[in-house]
Amino acid sequence: MKEIIMYGTIGMAGFFLLLMGSIIYNPRIWLQDYPEVIKNRVPQKNDKENRLSLVVGIPFMALLFLLPLYGAVRFAMNTPEASFLQIFLVIIGIYNMMNLTDYVIIDLLIFCLWTPKFIRIPEERFQKKDYETYWEHTRGFFIGFGMSLVLGLVGGFVIHLLI
């Protein structure tokens, strides 16, 4: 299933560049995803930051949900005998390559271990321990995994019926 590797790699690169680029530009764009202790110490997002969240969030969500479906459609079109299980695995494989990029590279390595200045909320009184929220990041990974299962089931069913 070369589609998993090909589209998963594209997704990992796009996911990483979009997320890190927007964090470097303005980490407050992702304020809703920061730990509660940090969110409670800084002002809420202003109108400009909310608009930026939409501008970045729409392509981010499109990448996260549409790329696995596109990869599965390509797989099904190139493999006429593809089973529902194979299509399902392509979808969750691509999605979880992005999910693992977020969890391992961005959450664990960059946020928890490195915690560079560019990811810190500017108005926030920095305390490294507030960014070392391993459980929150792990919980986020499992939520993402659950979302991949739902996307895989629904998308796999529809693709299997239509192609």
Image (cartoon, rainbow, N blue to C red):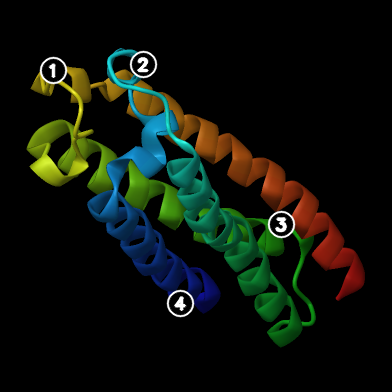
Q: Are marks 2 and 1 in contact (CB under 8 Å)?
A: no
Q: Please tell me which residue lies in front, 47 or 11.
A: 47
Residue type pointed to by label 2: Glu
Residue 132 visible to an observer of this rendering: no
Distance between mark 2 and mark 1 Cα atoms: 13 Å
Q: Which residue is mark 3?
A: 85
Q: Nearer the viewer, mark 3 or mark 4?
A: 4
Q: Please tell me which residue lies in front, 31 or 154.
A: 31
Quadrant (top left, top right, bottom left, bottom right) of the C terminus: bottom right
N-terminal-most mark, 4 or 2:
4
N-terminal-most mark, 3 or 4:
4
How many numbered marks have been drawn onto this rendered protein structure?
Answer: 4
- Disc number placed over residue 129 in the picture, else none: 1
Q: Are marks 4 and 2 in contact (CB under 8 Å)?
A: no
Q: Is residue 51 left or right of residue 117?
A: right
N-terminal-most mark, 2 or 1:
2
Distance between mark 2 and mark 3 Cα atoms: 39 Å
